[in-house]
């Protein structure tokens, strides 16, 4: 089975216009995958001057989808849950750490931690995805 390149995964992530709209960076990793990073700005905040939970949800969903892309599977989200552990202050940098827990032919289960550079965990996500196509054909 063909394996997508890191560049193909990053390019595909940029096709998700909300990622570019939010200013999320897609950063190559040493293991050939990619992670998402965001410098939290005031326009990302909720009325309490902390990062809006929807931004964390979007980052986690996209990061887990990128992990699936590395397995050559384009996916849609069936379900996603997040546990918000700490408020994310403005001017902090949030980094995703996504991984696949279980992969079937069409169903993939993933998790993602949203952390800062010091490895403090701000949120944890769990999602189930359904594979609809391959990123690259056999």
Image (cartoon, rainbow, N blue to C red):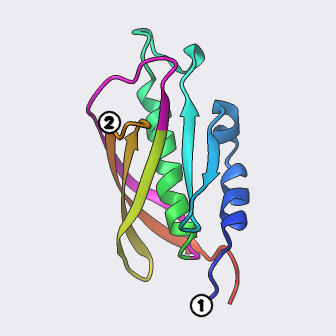
Determine which of the numbered discs, if any, sits on residue 1 in the image: 1
Q: Quadrant of residue 103?
A: bottom left
Task: Reply above or below: 110 against 91.
Answer: below
Q: Is residue 91 above or below residue 47?
A: below
Residue extent of the magenta highlight? 72-94
Q: Nearer the viewer, residue 6 or 19?
A: 6
**Measuring 53% from the left and 65% from the top, which residue is drawn there?**
75
Question: Could you say which quadrant of the image residue 41 lies in?
Answer: top right
- Give coordinates of residue 32: x percent, y percent: 59, 68
Q: Residue at x 39, y 24 (%)?
A: 88
Looking at the image, which residue is at 73% across and 58% down? 11
Q: Is residue 67 left or right of residue 109?
A: right
Tell me if residue 111 comes above or below residue 39 in the rendering. below
Q: Nearer the viewer, residue 86 or 58?
A: 86
Count of number-bearing discs: 2
> In the figure, is residue 18 to the left or right of 102?
right
Task: Give residue 25's position: percent from left, percent from top.
Answer: 64, 41
Q: Give the number of the mark in front: 2 or 1.
A: 2
Closest to the observer, 8 or 131: 8
Q: Count neighbours of disc 2 (C-alpha within 10 A) and say few if under 14, some if 14 to 19, many if 20 or more.
A: few
Which residue is drawn at the image coordinates 54% and 24% (left, top)?
Answer: 40
Task: Establish if 51 lies above or below 135.
Answer: above
Residue 76 lies, in percent from the top left, at 52, 60
Q: Secondary structure at mark 1?
A: loop
**Could you give the CA–CA distance between mark 2 and mark 1, rounded to whole angstroms?**
37 Å
CA neighbours of label 1 inside 10 A, class few (<14), some (14 to 19), many (20+)? few
* Residue identifier under label 2: 120
Q: Is residue 75 magenta?
A: yes
135 displayed left or right of 29 = right
**SS category of the residue bearing label 2:** loop
Residues under numbered marks 2 and 1 in contact, where contact means CB atoms less than 8 Å apart: no
């Amino acid at each position: 089975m063909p394996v997508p390149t890191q560049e193909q995964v990053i390019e595909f992530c940029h096709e998700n216009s909300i990622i570019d709209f939010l200013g999320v960076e897609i950063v190559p990793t040493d293991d050939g995958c990619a992670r998402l990073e965001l410098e939290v700005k005031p326009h990302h905040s909720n009325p309490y001057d902390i990062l809006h939970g929807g931004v964390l949800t979007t980052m986690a969903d996209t990061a887990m989808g990128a992990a699936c892309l590395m397995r050559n599977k384009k996916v849609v989200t069936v379900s996603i849950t997040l546990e918000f552990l700490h408020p994310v202050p403005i001017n902090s940098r949030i980094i995703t750490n996504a991984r696949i827990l279980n992969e079937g032919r069409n169903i993939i289960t993933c998790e993602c931690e949203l952390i800062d550079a010091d490895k403090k965990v701000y949120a944890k996500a769990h999602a189930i995805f359904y594979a609809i196509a391959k990123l690259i054909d056999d």
